[in-house]
Image (spheres, rainbow, N blue to C red):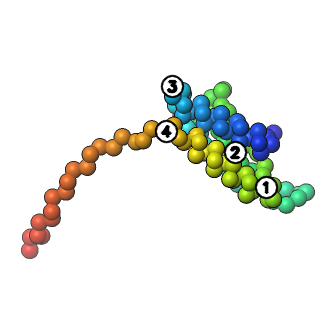
Amino acid sequence: MPLSNEDFLQQVKALLGQRTGEGQESGSVFMTQKPMNTAYGPACLLVRATDGRGKKAGKVKLSTLVAPHEMEAFFAAWTRVGKEGMGHLRKKERKEKRKKKPRREQEQ
């Protein structure tokens, strides 16, 4: 059953905190959205979030329906939650790139 928009955002924030906090579990959080046509009203947007555990028993699944008149406010809040959740991520360690030697003239 879909959650209210506020409850959904609070639970997504908690889910991101579990995945990115210091000394916490590592893993993925997948967020998807798709339009949903309803027979009794204007088209809504179905927004989902899951913790990416595959088909394991403890998988967390969250969803909400966003009405057209609430979309702007919802996405502003969703963006804020996403940015806060990504604040704890580590930067990817990259190998040093070797300097390329200049190309030699091709043999004729």
Q: Nearer the viewer, mark 3 or mark 2?
A: 3
Given contact means CB atoms under 8 Å apart, are the residues at marks 2 and 4 in contact?
no
Given contact means CB atoms under 8 Å apart, are the residues at marks 1 and 2 in contact?
no
Mark number, residue 48: 2
Name the spot of residue 76 as percent of width and height, x first: 68, 53
Q: Sequence-wise, which precedes: disc 1 or disc 2? A: 2
Q: Secondary structure at mark 4?
A: loop
Q: Secondary structure at mark 1?
A: helix
Name the spot of residue 78 as percent of width and height, x first: 67, 48
Residue type pointed to by label 3: Gly
Alpha-carbon distance for marks 4 and 1?
30 Å
The answer to whether 28 appears left or right of 62 in the picture is left
Residue type pointed to by label 1: Glu
Q: Which residue is mark 4?
A: 89
Q: Which residue is mark 1?
A: 70
Q: Residue at x 73, y 51 (%)?
A: 74
Q: Secondary structure at mark 3?
A: loop
Q: Which residue is mark 3?
A: 23
Q: Secondary structure at mark 2?
A: strand
Name the spot of residue 58 as percent of width and height, x first: 66, 27
Name the spot of residue 65 as percent of width and height, x first: 78, 49
Which image quarter is the N terminus in?
Answer: top right
Given contact means CB atoms under 8 Å apart, are the residues at marks 3 and 1 in contact?
no
Q: Sequence-wise, which precedes: disc 3 or disc 4? A: 3
Residue type pointed to by label 2: Arg
